[in-house]
Amino acid sequence: MRNRHELTKNYIFRFYQCGLSIEDTAKLCFKTVRTVTLWDKGKPIPPECKRLMRMYAGIELDPLGDEWREWSLKKGRLITPNNWSLTPERIITGNALLEINAEDDRKLKAEIIRVARLLKKLP
């Protein structure tokens, strides 16, 4: 016999809109699998858990300021306005290169910024 899910609003939100399994939801929200199963059956999802699920799925992320406009978080990655997916390791590596700030690095950084601006202007 197949395990069938009743299509409640909570189940549709969790599974179809956020793309989260029961186990992933439980880990993300620090809840038990049983608690998430009860949500799927119609028990209200706490607002903080809904927010976490939205953030994880990239549905909602409040802007931190004008410089963060069009940036988002999606499934543990920072997504730039150009749709580049940045992992924590890439961000740390980029920052380390900027910290070194050798003469060659400054020239390369200026060239990268110039090219990035040109790419942003492309349709």
Image: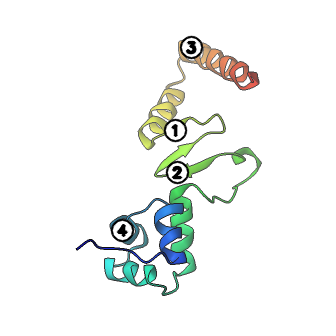
Q: Amino acid at mark 2?
A: Lys
Separation of residues labelled 1 and 2 (CA atoms): 9 Å
Q: Nearer the viewer, residue 82 or 87?
A: 82
Q: What residue does disc 1 label?
A: 85
Answer whether labels 1 and 2 touch (C-beta < 8 Å): yes
Q: What residue does disc 4 label?
A: 27
Label located before the other in sequence (3 or 4): 4
Q: Amino acid at mark 3?
A: Glu
Q: Quadrant of the N terminus?
A: bottom left
In the rendering, at what x and y percent does residue 40 appear? 44, 79
Disc 1 element: strand
How packed mark 3 is, by other alpha carbons closer than 10 Å (few <14, some 14-19, many 20 or more), is: few
Q: Amino acid at mark 4?
A: Lys
Tell me the residue at 69%/55% (across/down). 64
Judge whether 26 appears above or below 55 on screen.
Answer: below
Q: What residue does disc 3 label?
A: 103
Label located before the other in sequence (2 or 4): 4
Q: What residue does disc 2 label?
A: 74
Answer whether labels 4 and 1 touch (C-beta < 8 Å): no
